[in-house]
Image (spheres, rainbow, N blue to C red):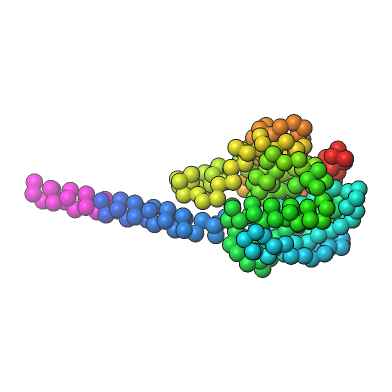
Amino acid sequence: MNFLFKKRLVKMNYLANILSIIVLGYFALLISTYIFQRNLLYHPKINNYYGHQLSVAVEKTIIKTQDNVELLSWYHNKNLNSDKTLLFLHGNAGSLENRIEKLNHFGNMKLNFLIVAWRGFNGNKGKPTEKGLYEDARSAIKWLNSKGITEKSIIIYGESLGTGVAIEISQNKNFAGVILEAPFTSMTDVGKDKYPFLPVSLLLKDKYESDKKIKNVKSPILVMHGKVDNIVPLYMGKKIYELANEPKHFFVQEYGDHMMDYDERLLNELKKFIQSLN
């Protein structure tokens, strides 16, 4: 009996040690995730597109934020008197160069445009945060206003993470229109989808709660989403569309992944929407 008891005790101690290691490992994962979460969210050095050359003239300019961060931006001025100006708010990865294909298409439309690189991107100083990106976007709006471009002449375009910024800055404003490419409901929802084993809502610093804000956007809205998006699921784009006010339009690209292809159908939807704003 004494031998069996000792054997059980050894086994219990062994299992307790294993459990302790698992618990400590999980807490170590929680701590490291909390500390380094912005490295998981923002990827300034990732390249998504290759080999594209600008076919449209852009003026490289610096936009200074209220907290003294200088943002590299590209500005294309076609006709400020008659054309709308599109403010492009890019996603969480890559540089301005990674958006050249899209910019070339904008150049072929009846549009002026401004694309701004976030703090921490394209060699800009500072570190990206939710609050910081909101300030960057609002600084871009102020810069356009300084050129005599009013809210009614501005179209806000958000790409992926940029949709969270676009929705934030479009609340209770009178912009000509808002375009959302691959929008998410909230960063908490995205985190839960990718990391179901983590208490994301407790850990997350940058929440981008678009689903709570979209009702405050009064401008016409175009939502575009890829059906096979493996980063932001299609149901999130559908939810944002359902919550949005009229007038609103929804375009699903049947084969589209997270980086939507600017094919003929998508370009036609963009042109139709932009023309409807005149």
- Observer able to see residue 246: yes
Residue drawn at x 48%, y 44% as measured from the top left = 201
Q: Position of residue 24 (x, y in %)?
A: 34, 55
* Range of residues picked out in magenta: 1-15
Most foreground residue, 131 or 252: 131
Residue drawn at x 74%, y 52% as measured from the top left = 141
Count of numbered marks: 0
| Prevailing secondary structure class for the magenta stretch in the rendered image | helix
- Find residue 125 and report its image quarter: bottom right
Is 9 magenta? The answer is: yes
| Quarter containing the C terminus | top right
Q: Position of residue 76 (x, y in %)?
A: 84, 58
- Find residue 270 and report its image quarter: top right
Residue drawn at x 26%, y 50% as measured from the top left = 15
- Height in image: 27 above or below 189? below
Q: Position of residue 67 (x, y in %)?
A: 62, 61
Residue drawn at x 30%, y 51% as measured from the top left = 19
- Observer able to see residue 226: no
Q: Is residue 76 left or right of residue 209?
A: right
Q: Position of residue 106 (x, y in %)?
A: 84, 52
